[in-house]
Image (cartoon, rainbow, N blue to C red):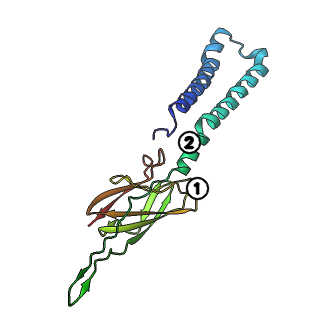
Amino acid sequence: MPLALSTGHEIGLGVTALVFILFALASSFLFPRYRPDYPGRGLLAFIVIAFVFFFGMLTAVEVFGAESKHHGEAAAAETTTAPAETTTTQQTTTAASTTSATKPAATKVPVSESEFKIVLSSTQLKAGPITFEAKNAGRIPHDLAIKQTGDKTKLIQPGGTAELKVTLKAGTYELYCSVPGHEAAGMKLNITVS
């Protein structure tokens, strides 16, 4: 699974890992070849340097491996709403009767999201207005998106819920989590609308 980090973070982690690996290889193979008594009297210095590199690596993972606060706030503030639905009422008046066309009620579909899966009670749905009631049962934020329409919920915090109201025609659609790396980790599901 590719890292869901920015290029700068990936480079920072890569450089830190490379320095740590080079130190480990040099202390295992190169230094003993030229100094058979290695580390000898320098054992304390070697242990201190090894700990500095180790804790430097842990710090780099914490700094470079975390999603930036700005990116997290932007994702939390980002909301995409479904296109406005219009209700059209046609009235025909005759001497005998008045008829009116009304919009059918939306089908409510409960959706459970967790690391890293999406669960629906049925993947076969009826065409028309659908309200996906997404619940984040996981420990990290998720959202619910439909690849073919571009519609998606806001970022759903753990334990939170969100609704995604759409009108779907017959066809196959992919539901997925658009948080970077989640779809690649398996957080996607195909549904059939007929």
Query: Helix, strand, or loop for circle 1?
Result: loop
Q: Nearer the viewer, mark 2 or mark 1?
A: 2
Q: Residue at x 28, y 80 (%)?
A: 100
Q: Does residue 171 appear to the left or right of 27 in the view shown?
A: left
Quadrant where the C terminus is found in the figure: bottom left
Crowd class of label 1 (few under 14; some 14 to 19; many from 20; radius 10 Å): few
What is the x, y in percent for residue 158? 58, 58
Residue 57, quarter of the rendered image: top right
- State how many labels appear: 2
- For label 1, the residue is 139
Point 72% across, 26% down: residue? 52
> Of the numbered discs in the image, which one, if any, rests on residue 22?
none
Say which amino acid is labelled 1. Arg
Ranked by sequence position, the earlier of labels 2 and 1 is 2
From the viewer's perspective, is 48 left or right of 173?
right
User: Residue 29: where, in percent of width, then height?
Assistant: 60, 17
The spot of residue 107 in percent (x, y) is 37, 72
Question: Which residue, given by chain and number where applicable, does mark 2 sit on?
Answer: 71
Most extreme residue toward the left is: 95
Q: Residue at x 36, y 52 (%)?
A: 147
Numbered disc 2: secondary structure:
helix
Would you place residue 79 above or below residue 39 in this image? below
Tell me the distance, in whole angstroms, between the alpha carbons under discs 2 and 1: 19 Å
* The residue positioned farthest toward the bottom in the image shown: 96
Picture quadrant of residue 37: top right
Foreground: 184 or 45? 184
Side (left or right) of 130 relative to 44: left
* Residue 51 x %, y %: 72, 28
Front residue of this view, candidates 59 and 177: 177
Name the quadrant of the N terminus.
Answer: top left
In the image shown, does 3 or 147 lie closer to the viewer? 147
* Amino acid type, label 2: His
